[in-house]
Amino acid sequence: MFTEIRFRDFREQYPGFLPGVLLILGILFAIDLLLYDRQENYLAEINALRANMTQEQQQRGDAMSVSRQAQRKLMLQLVHRQAQFGNALHLSVDLDSSKIALVQEGAVLRTLPVELGAARTLSKSDSASGVMRGADSVVRVLGPADAWPVPRWVFKDRRLAVPADSMVPGALGPVAVLLGSGTVIYSLPTTGPLRDPTYVLPGAIRASADDLRAIAPNLVPGTPVYIY
């Protein structure tokens, strides 16, 4: 009885609470139905494609899919092993713990906490994947005056006007490291669209300027970088 009275008082004090909850539940239910419907469509398309394939083609396709997954898993295991025990001086990037280590012959010389830029999609033509795992290497180390071509979609993502020339001096901060895959390890800049400390460039890695300055003298073109 006491609980009933309290709930009645609550409803009278906040008349919009219950309709709001029911609305949210309805939206969530609609999203579930949409996802389920899309899943059914995808499965139907896959089944239709497989129906037009011979049994041999189906078996070959399944084997190739399993093989690619196994190769990818093996490659990442090798990258992880090289990151831990490689003899040459290298950078080991642990995405799960958000840390970079400067390593040589299994000895960790310095560890850097980092921030990772998540994948971002603005449109079919403007998108960026997350930080990719695999073996990479240093191409160049940039200083505070070096310009970097900021992708046009970054300006759109930051709701800034897209300049005619996207080469921005100091866009990657006081010190940055460019990798062969196009991934960048950069520090917080004081100019350009990346100067916001709450925004990390999608698909990139951001570390403190002091940490990057400390390891930069050890990085030369070709220095291995293992991202796992």
Image (cartoon, helix red, strand yellow):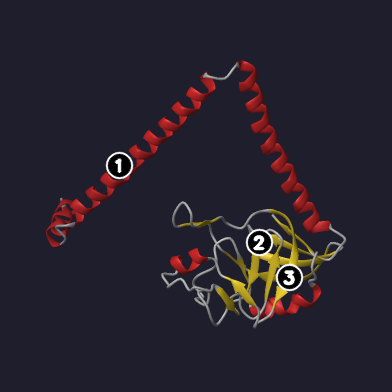
Residue 163 vs residue 198, the one in the foreground: 163
Q: Residue furthest top?
A: 55
Label 3's element? strand
Placement of 167 over or under 10, stated as above or below: below
As measured in the structure, the alpha-carbon distance from the residue carrying label 2 to the one carrying label 1 is: 40 Å
Placement of 112 over or under 50, stated as above or below: below
Residue that appears at 18% across and 51% down? 19
User: Which amino acid type is marked by label 1?
Assistant: Ala
Residue 60's image quarter? top right
Placement of 49 over or under 188, stated as above or below: above
Residue that appears at 72% across and 73% down? 141
As measured in the structure, the alpha-carbon distance from the residue carrying label 1 to the one carrying label 3 is: 50 Å
Residue that numbered label 3 is attached to: 140
Residue 84's image quarter? bottom right
Residue that appears at 79% across and 52% down? 81
Q: Position of residue 203 (x, y in %)?
A: 58, 60
Residue that numbered label 1 is attached to: 30
Residue that numbered label 2 is attached to: 182
Query: Total number of numbered labels?
Result: 3
Residue 15 vs residue 87, the one in the foreground: 87
User: Which amino acid type is marked by label 2?
Assistant: Gly
Picture quarter with the C terminus = bottom right
As measured in the structure, the alpha-carbon distance from the residue carrying label 3 to the one carrying label 2 is: 11 Å
Q: Position of 90 compared to 61: left or right?
A: right
Q: Earlier in the sequence, mark 3 or mark 2?
A: 3
Label 2's element? loop
Residue 38 vs residue 182, the one in the foreground: 182
Q: Residues within 10 Å of mark 2 (few under 14, many from 20)?
A: few
Placement of 80 over or under 161, stated as above or below: above
